[in-house]
Image: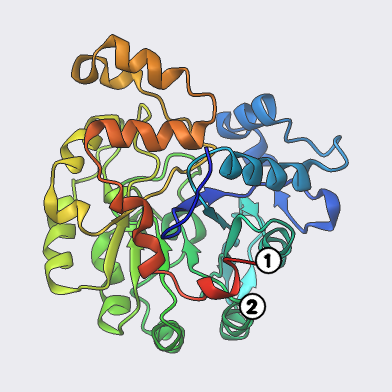
Amino acid sequence: MTGGLGAPRIDCHVHLAGVGTDDSGCWISPAFEKRITFRLLRMRHGMSASRASADADWAADVAERVRGSELTHAVVLGFDGVYRHGRLDRGRTQMVVPAEWVFRVCRAHPELLPGPSINPHRADALERLEECIEGGAVLIKWLPATQGIDPADPALAAFYRRCAEARLPILTHSGGTEGTFAQVAPALKDLRRILPALRAGVPMIVAHTGAPVAYARDPDQVPLLRTMMAEFPHLWVDNSGMANPSRFQHLPRYARSADLVARTLHGSDFPVPSNAFWYARRLGMGEVARLERIRNRMQRDIEIKRALGYPDGVLTRAASVLPNLERWIGR
């Protein structure tokens, strides 16, 4: 399928990954290489430094999947490290996908939009942010509990001020546990810690609709999220990473919640799997079989959410939230 005419259909949550080939600057820690997450990536996608073009191949594969779906574009996300006293703490950093690589692959593939990651605690954070704004970033990616980012730190006031001026959203993993990576500071994912950014006028996108994961004991902060959305019209969510064992039970309920749907942007969380068989009782085995036959996992994710009740407006909403699209779309 192709995107066709009309408003851009954007997946706002797709991961780049890399092991340092192609002069990408990507890096994976020895500890992360041992996690089941990376082992599955290596098996399924050949993520190994022994492949001389592994990092470029990953980006090309993402672009090909976008072309093979009804999407027109996907935001590809970078990943910054943990910083201590302004300097990279390599011992606690699990992965690095630098902003320079994010922009490079987006210049090479017209389907891709840049979502670099900047840890605001790095000494040169404001300089890096300015470079990303000038380069046409459409959002900034944060994983507070994994990157050691404290969104409530008063020292971030200047960072927030510049994001607000540029209308540059921050996509944050706040609320529920992030299971792909180890958490170095679990308390930093609390939704209340993004209040200073919202009060400064920064558009915020909460990944996974802030949903708790099945195996964690975290409190469900979605009721709090709803309260915050009523106060801040620039607070958004995405529905990424939901059709999998960790959060699948929430997706049908959220799809029926008008207040959540009205603020939801589509996201797949690729390469995180998205499967229909979690919804066999709701959709029926025939529909599940049809959905599972869709080999393009980005398209499958769209159609699972459509089958559960998400309207197609969710696919186009990012076009009204993300800045700088005119620099990338229609090249």
In this picture the colour scheme is rainbow
**Nearest the camera: 142 or 56?**
56
Residue 78 appears at what percent x and percent y? 60, 59
Residue in view at x 19 percent, y 20 percent: 282
Q: Position of residue 165 (x, y in %)?
A: 42, 89
In the rendered image, is residue 29 in sight? no
| Image: 91 above or below 124 | above
Residue identified by numbered label 2: 135
Query: What's the residue at 48%, 42% (across, down)?
Result: 70
Q: Which kind of residue does numbered mark 2 sit on?
A: Gly
Q: Is residue 3 left or right of residue 89?
A: left
Image quarter (top left, top right, bottom left or bottom right) of the C terminus: bottom right
Q: Which residue is mark 1?
A: 103
Q: Position of residue 85 (x, y in %)?
A: 58, 76
Q: Is residue 183 above or below residue 272?
A: below
User: Please, what is the three-letter code of the amino acid marked with disc 1?
Assistant: Phe
Q: Which mark, residue 285? A: none
Report the front residue among 34 and 327: 327
